[in-house]
Amino acid sequence: MAPRVGILGFQGCIEPHEEILATFGASTVRVTSPHDLTQIDRLILPGGESTTMLRFIKRFEMVPALQEFARHHPVWGICAGAILAARQVHNPSQDSLDLIDISAHRNFYGGQLDSFTTELQITCQEAPIRAHFIRAPLLAPLPPTQARPVPTIESSLSSQPIFISQGHIWACSFHIELTGDTTLHQRFIAL
């Protein structure tokens, strides 16, 4: 039976994930309430505007439910979603969900006009993937807390980490869902 994948549904790059996941037979749920988390097996925090998403998360009192969900289920934060998942956020600082032991420095790779596409090598994968960087954050591992495993750098760009995993929690600086590459989605639903 294919997993049910939730996508935080308040704002951001939602539809491309739904389209990719449908090609694998995975059903999706747009998550906008704590109850929605009881209907899914894993969660994507999509790219978009982290401040806006955080406002809705707080308004609908989802912080504790998201943190509890992440203790037991795979979560993948992409760009703004990685910022939400981080333990620390800079430039400017903001609250976060503290799901993965990383710091996220917002807009490290520039503003909207500085967006670019490049090929990346990912660990445990032979072929490179194409990825979009759109107002992308810098990610950096922090010492692990709360008996979580040590963060693992899965990919780097110019010696800077851009994909970090920590157990079943992932954080990526880049958008993969906009390129048509399905490799990481396949790995995520297999977690």
Image (cartoon, rainbow, N blue to C red):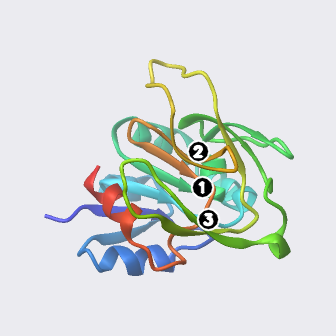
Q: Residues within 10 Å of mark 3 (few under 14, many from 20)?
A: many
Q: How crowded is mark 2: few (under 14 residues within 10 Å), some or many (20 or more)?
A: many
Query: Are discs 1 and 2 less than 8 Å apart at CB?
Result: yes
Residue 90 occupies which quadrant of the picture? Answer: top right
Residue visible at 53% across and 38% down in the picture:
99
Apparent side of residue 172 relative to residue 71 in the rendered image (left or right): right
Give x and y (percent) for residue 20. Answer: 38, 77
Residue type of the residue flagged with mark 2: Ala
Q: Residue at x 48, y 25 (%)?
A: 150
Q: What residue type is labelled 3?
A: Gly
- Do the numbered discs 1 and 3 sit on residues whose CB atoms are within 8 Å? yes
Nearer to us in this view, 56 or 138: 138
The residue to which callout 3 is attached is 47
Residue 43, x across and y down, in percent: 42, 56
The label shown at residue 85 is: 2
Q: Name the residue under label 1.
A: 81
